[in-house]
Amino acid sequence: MKDAFGAPQSLLVLGGTSEIALATARRLISLRTRRVWLAGRPSPALEAAAVELRDRGADVRTVAFDALDSAAHEEVLGKVFAEGDIDVVLMAFGIAGDQARDEEEPAAAVRVAQTNYTGAVSAGLVCAGALQAQGHGSLVVLSSVAGERARRADFIYGSSKAGLDAFAQGLGDALQGTGVQVMVVRPGAVRTRGAAGQPEQPLTTTPEEVAGAIVTGLRRRSETVWVPGSLRVVMSALRHVPRPLYRRLPV
C-alpha cells in the first residue's frame, strides 16, 4: 500500500535494465519506495542495476523474466505477487528492432511484434489480474509516440507500440472501479545509451524526464502521459495530415 505521504512502497519492473525504468525506480526510492523487484533476463546488467538500487536504500530482488516466454508469465509473476502486495507495476520491456533488416527478415520483424505486443499482452493481463485480486495498484505501460501514426522509418516497431497502446487503454477501461489504475506513457525519442551516435530528433527527451512524468502521473492518477507534454499537440495535428503529404514530412 502507499505510505502516509502517498508514495508507493513497492515496485515491480518488467524490463529491469531499462534506463527509463531505472530512472523511475530511483525517483520512487527517493520518495519512500522500499521494495523493488527487477524482472528481466538474467545478466550482469540486471545484477548491477539491483546493486545500485540497493545502495540507495531499497530491498531489491531480481527475477528471471522473458517477454517471449508467455507460457511462464503466470507462474513467474505469480510468485512475485505471492511475496506481498505490489503498488506499482512498470511494464518497460521492448525492442526497437532494425527496420531495414526486419523488412528483409520477417522472423526478426515477428520478434519485435511478439516482444512489444504479444509479450506485453500476456504479462499485462497477469499483472492486472493480480492487482485486481489485491484490490489496489497501478499498471504503468511504456508505450511510444511511434504508435500514434505509422512512419516509413519505423512502421514495424510503431505498429507493435500501436497495438500495445490500444490494449493498455482498453485494459484501463475494463479495470475502472476495481481500484486498479492503468497509465499509458507516450514518450517521443529518448536520449539513451542505445541511441548514442544517432541524429537527435526534435523534442527528444531523457530517461530522467520520462521518469519525472511517470511519477507525476501516478500522483495525479493520469490515464495518459505524453513526454514532453507538447507532443500531444504535435501528434494531434499530424494525425490529420493527408497521407500523401505525411509521407513527405521529415518525421
Image: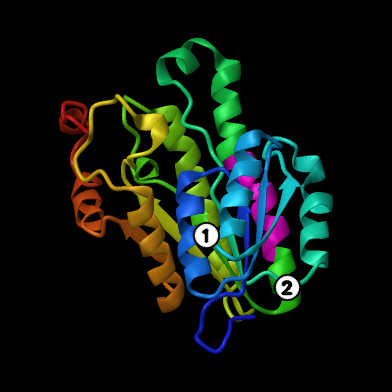
At horizontal 58% and vertical 58% (from top left) the residue drawn is: 55
Disc 1, SS: helix
How many residues crowd around disc 2 within 10 Å: few (fewer than 14), some, or many (20 or more)?
Answer: some
Residue in front for this viewpoint, 98 or 117: 98
**Coloration of the structure image:** rainbow
x, y percent for residue 86: 68, 69
Disc 2, SS: loop
How many residues crowd around disc 1 within 10 Å: few (fewer than 14), some, or many (20 or more)?
Answer: many
x, y percent for residue 116: 56, 39
Q: Which mark is residue 25?
A: 1
User: In the shown orientation, is residue 169 left or right of residue 49?
Assistant: left
Q: Quadrant of the N terminus?
A: bottom right
Residue in front for this viewpoint, 54 or 207: 54
Separation of marks 1 and 2 at Cα, in angstroms:
17 Å
Residue type at mark 2 is Asp
Residue picked out by circle 2: 85
Q: Is residue 121 magenta?
A: yes
Q: Which residues are magenta?
A: 117-128
Residue type at mark 1 is Ala
Q: Is residue 153 magenta?
A: no
x, y percent for residue 228: 26, 55
User: In the shown orientation, is residue 182 left or right of residue 207?
Assistant: right
Viewer can see residue 223: no
Of tags 1 and 2, which is closer to the observer? 1
x, y percent for residue 250: 17, 29
Residue 195 falls in image quadrant: top left
At horizontal 42% and vertical 31% (from top left) the residue drawn is: 194
